[in-house]
Image: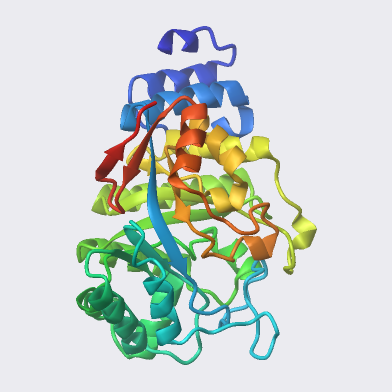
Amino acid sequence: MTGLLKNIHNPDLQKIADKVANEERITPDEGLRLYQKAELPLLGLLAGIARRRKNGNYAFFNRNFHIEPTNKCVHNCRFCSYHRPEGDPLSWEYSQDEMLDIVKKFDTKEVTEVHIVGGVHPSHDIHYWGSLLQRIREHRPGIHIKAYSAVELDYMITRSGMSVREGLALLKEYGLDSIPGGGAEIFDETLRRKICPEKTTSEKWLAIHKTAHELGISSNATMLYGHIEDYSHRIDHLTRLRDLQDRTGGFNAFIPLKYKMADNQMSYAGEVSMIEDLKNYAVSRIYLDNFAHIKAYWPMISRDVAGISLIFGADDLDGTIDDTTRIYSMAGSEEKNPAMTTDDICRIIRDAGFVPVERDSLYNFIHTFAL
């Protein structure tokens, strides 16, 4: 395959291609050049080399479900279609008992992970959210609990008068296994003041994840793309993640999150094309050389595009989900009732030419399916 990388007409791109082939790290300027100058076939080729180096011919998924405790939120991010104020007919807030009932619906199913994320509720403190984890752990001891974005954590920990380290250590005692990557959006503070001015700063987001890693709590990382950012903002974001991963090694996966325009204050920005989605997956895979996994979150981009993304650097399709998330369906996603069986996911992976692997939340193999 590397023989195809010879005789690239642009000498700058040839140099980058040679570095990728030789497992050398590319610089921020070179990452920006890939976004700006590289055509999709070259990006797919380079991302494929990087992807197979990390994960061979495997593509991963897990059996999971989501709990979204509330869409009431102290923040009012302009890109968000999920937030609803108190009294809005589309707002909700589940009690702990109702959330435990969601868990109980999966008592007879072979799920391995519950993913808990929602709005930043104005009233509940860390002990409320911790006791929810404890009740889930008592009911289903073996399940992996991935819960609370850094933005939720920032609010509940600060409200409880604790340091980040104290708060995360307490939540770990309650039953927290890992944290999702939400709330990162785009790290450039000038842009954050335009799209999410009330939200946790990028420095605090990174500090929370760094502390979690130091405490043995792994996490994911995300980037919201396709709104008013440019390629330099994306590279800055990826660089900050790569730098932190160099220091801690605590990120499991990177998840590009596509901005969806329905029913929010930034609809004027429109949405980027599938070509841009694939370019973003490819550059992310090439640039984040210290991330083992790139996840294509299929409820956001559709199962068809997620399948194609496997050819452009992604190696993970998230999970079965079983119609337990509304965040992207409320923003206009094609997946209105997101749910897939293991057979559905395996078919998508096989159609892209990869071997399906059911994993746990930490990417340990559970079952390898035939190609």
Percent position of residue 245, x then y:
31, 50
Report the front residue among 287 and 28.
287
Q: Is residue 35 above or below residue 149?
A: above
Specify the quadrant of the image occupied by residue 206.
bottom left
The front one of 292 and 184 is 292
Judge whether 275 appears above or below 126 on screen: above
Residue depicted at 56% across the width and 33% down the height: 308
Q: Which residue is at a point 61% across and 46% down the rendered structure image?
A: 302
Where, by quadrant of the figure, is residue 210 drawn?
Answer: bottom left
Residue 165 can be seen, yes or no: no
Residue 278 placed where, x, y %?
59, 36
Residue occupying image coordinates x 70% and y 84%: 89
Above or below — where is 244 with respect to 94?
A: above
- The image shows a total of numbered marks equal to 0
> Relative to 340, is 157 on the left or the right?
left
Instruction: Estimate the x, y position of residue 96 in percent, counting from the top left.
Output: 40, 85
Q: In this orientation, does residue 277 appear?
A: yes
In the displayed structure image, the side of residue 295 where residue 192 appears, left or right:
right
371 relative to 5 in the view: left or right: left
Q: Residue at x 46, y 87 (%)?
A: 95
| Percent position of residue 304, x then y | 61, 39
Whether 340 is drawn above or below 89: the answer is above
